[in-house]
Every structure is written in C-alpha cells, then in structure tokens.
Image (tube, rainbow, N blue to C red):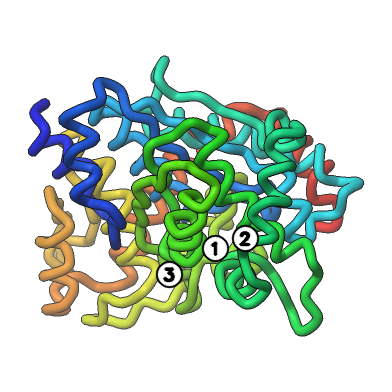
Amino acid sequence: MDIKEKLKLIKRNTAEIIGEEELSNLLKTKKKPVIYWGTAPTGKPHIGYFLPALKVADFLKAGFKAIILLADLHAALDNTPWNILEKRYDYYSKIIPAMIRAIGVESKDLEFIKGSDFQLKPEYMYDVLQLSSMVSVHDAHKAASEVVKLGDNPKLSGLIYPIMQVLDEQYLGIDAQLGGTDQRKIMVLARESLPKLGYEKRIEVMNPLIPGLIGKKMSASDPKSKIDLLDSEQEVKEKINSAECVAGEVNNGVLAFLKYVIMVIKSDKKEKFIVKRPEKYGGGISYSSYGALEKDFKAKKLHPADLKTALAEEVSKLLKEIQKDKSLFELAKKAYPSE
C-alpha cells in the first residue's frame, strides 16, 4: 500500500484531521507510526463504538501500531463512582476487545493500556501540575464542555480531565490521536499546550458522531438513544423499529449507522447489504455501496420498515459475536448494578 492509498484509508469516514500535512510527512518518514483511541469506562458501551473501532482497523491496515486506552481515571473524573470504577474497567477490558474482534480485527500491532498504570506515576502527575498552572479555568472548562458531564455546579475533576487527556498523548508515545468530533476542543488544547512543556504537538483525527435513534447523539447514558452491545435480538428489533427514520429523509441514526458501520464492513468484506421484501413490494434488493442505498431511500424506493428489518438483522449478527463470551453479562451486572 503506497502513501496515497494509506491516506485515503485513514481519511475514510473522518470529519476532520488537524495536521493533515504532518500526517503525510509522518507516513513518508516513519515506518510504523502510532495512533491511539481512548475510551473511559463510564456508561455501557453501545453500537456507536463500532465507528471508532473501524477507524482503528483502518489505521492498522495503513501500517500503524494502534493503542486503545481504557481510561479508568478519566471515568472517575467524569463522575463514575470510585467504589465501582474497577468493576467498570473489568467490563470494558473484556467487551471492547470483543467488539474489536467482532469486526474482524486481530493484530499484533494492537495494544490495550489501562490509564492508571501510567497516569499515577510521579513524572506524569508532575506534568499535570505544570500544565494546570498554564491552562486557564476558562480554557479547561471550554475543552471539557462536550465530553465531561459538568452540570450546573461542576466539580474540579471535570477540569482536570482535559489536562490529563492532553498529557496522555505524550506519555503513550503516540504520533496521532483518534476521537469523535466532541473531542475537538481537547485536541486543540493539546496542540496548543504540549509545546509549552517542550513536547511535540500531535496529529488529531476526528470521526463523526453517529446520531442517536431518537434524533440526537448516541449516548451511553440514554438507553432510548442507543443499542447496548449486550442487547438481545428482540431488543435490537424493538429499538430499531421505534427509531426515527422518515421516508426520504437521510439525517437520522438508522442511515448514519448503515453509512459508517454496516456498509463499511460489507464493502471491506466485498459483501452486499441485502434487504428482504415480499414480491408485491418489489422483492429482495441488495446494495454494494451506501450511495446507492441512500439514493433509493431518498427517492422513496426503499421503505423505512424494510430497511429497519434488514439493519436489525445485521446489528444482531455483530452483537452475537460479542455475546459469545457469556462472562460479559455477569461483569455488566457488577459494573451497572442499578440497570
């Protein structure tokens, strides 16, 4: 794969890359660059996590080493109770690798790291204090605003969160960070702040956020907006059937998940997305690309009910791969006892 092909793969399904020229130079000068994606064990992971997982896969295919940071301390800073923190880490440490395997990623160049394994070291905490003397309360609040649950009376922990995420780039030894567009302000803060400590700024890659099933961002804290990775086939059907998806309108969570996840998986496997329909409604139809599917949906040649049924089947197939590990259900009960 040449540099042009690698860049095309890396840019696939991204919303923005800060430092795109730096990325081109990196691919020319470094044999195995390093990317990281971080996730904090807060709410239960949902199917929206498949989008960054597929981007991690793209980076691996482009010759990168990929680190997935399971940021346990960040979860505590974002209001996960300390007494349940380790149980949520245990759940994430099992279900995130299972999700990665479900999309066919098995790689010697993929590494999982627990945040507290390096974030409690003296040199890291010294830099946290250094950076806290350089970043204003206003800038820390602004950076955290789309990521941390700050509320009307925000805790100090929410302002420490972005400072630590900035420093993770240095202490993980990475060249680039992958995150959702909600992470943009923290990524910009990182590029502005790291040079003040004598460190290099990194490349920031952002993937779009998949809308929720009820018309907003898919959220781990809103059960109605998302499909949990442990949901049953019946729950998947019910949630997708009740999702907002008006005939001819493409700006919704159903079409977005098809675009950024299902059709990507199908395309990479050279498979077609099949929609089963009775003969009286035109019979079965298959799609090799999302563009063709969207075109038919816009033209109202493809009914939302038929599309939802086909999508529910595909989502359930993915989740069944994850749910083969029955220990996940017990871990989830311990991590989320009130659910």
Q: Position of residue 50 (x, y in %)?
A: 43, 47
Callout 1 secondary element:
loop
Question: Amino acid under label 3?
Answer: Pro
Choose mark 1 or mark 3, whichever is in front: 3
Outermost residue on the right side: it is 83
Q: Is residue 47 visible?
A: no
Task: Say whether marks 1 and 3 touch (CB < 8 Å).
Answer: no
Task: Say whether marks 1 and 2 touch (CB < 8 Å).
Answer: yes
Q: Position of residue 124 (x, y in %)?
A: 68, 38
Picture quarter with the C terminus: bottom right
Q: Name the residue carrying label 3.
A: 211
The local crowd at label 1, few if under 14, some if 14 to 19, many if 20 or more residues have their Cα within 10 Å, is: many
Image point (84%, 42%), residue name = 334
Q: Earlier in the sequence, mark 1 or mark 2?
A: 2
Q: Is residue 250 above or below residue 161?
A: below
Q: Earlier in the sequence, mark 2 or mark 3?
A: 3
In screen coordinates, is 211 left or right of 64?
right
Q: Nearer the viewer, residue 12 or 3?
A: 3
Callout 2 secondary element:
loop
Q: State which quadrant residue 145 falls in.
A: bottom right
In screen coordinates, is 241 left or right of 118?
left
Q: CA distance from mark 1 to mark 3?
A: 9 Å
Picture quarter with the N terminus: top left
Q: Name the residue carrying label 1.
A: 226
The local crowd at label 3, few if under 14, some if 14 to 19, many if 20 or more residues have their Cα within 10 Å, is: many
Q: Name the residue carrying label 2.
A: 220
Question: Amino acid under label 2?
Answer: Ala
Q: Earlier in the sequence, mark 1 or mark 3?
A: 3
In screen coordinates, is 337 left or right of 109?
right
Q: Is residue 220 visible?
A: yes
